[in-house]
Amino acid sequence: MPIPTNLDVEICELKKLLVHLVEQSQFNFLDPRVLALSQRLDILILQEMKQQRTGLT
């Protein structure tokens, strides 16, 4: 199993935060905080996928 990178750790932490925000917003997925964090996660996940594809991790 590969050693987690800083990006992996950040994604994991932001996923936990997203779950908390969704619960806090009473599952309102259109809450601006939920949307902003979800979009940030999308960018980081895409970055990680690109790195894995090119073998940089």
Image (spheres, grey):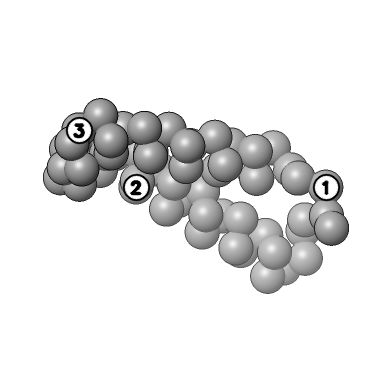
Circle 2 or circle 1, nearest the eye? 1
Q: Identify the residue position indicated by label 2 in the image.
A: 39
Q: Vertical placement of 13 versus 38: above or below?
A: above
Neighbours of disc 3 within 10 Å: few (<14), some (14-19), many (20+): some
Circle 2 or circle 3, nearest the eye? 3
Question: x and y percent of residue 14 in the render?
Answer: 48, 37
Q: Is residue 15 left or right of residue 10?
A: left
Residue 25 numbered mark, or none = 3
Q: Identify the residue position indicated by label 1 in the image.
A: 3
Marks 1 and 3 in Cβ contact (< 8 Å): no
- Secondary structure beneath dot 1 equals loop
Circle 1 or circle 3, nearest the eye? 3
Question: x and y percent of residue 40 in the render?
Answer: 40, 43
Going 67% across and 60% down the picture, which residue do you hit? 51
Q: Vertical placement of 49 versus 38: above or below?
A: below
Camera-side residue: 17 or 44? 17
Marks 2 and 3 in Cβ contact (< 8 Å): no
Please name the amino acid that badge 2 sits on: Gln
Residue 12 numbered mark, or none = none
- Secondary structure beneath dot 3 equals loop
Neighbours of disc 2 within 10 Å: few (<14), some (14-19), many (20+): few
Q: Is residue 16 left or right of residue 37?
A: right
Q: Vertical placement of 24 versus 12: above or below?
A: above
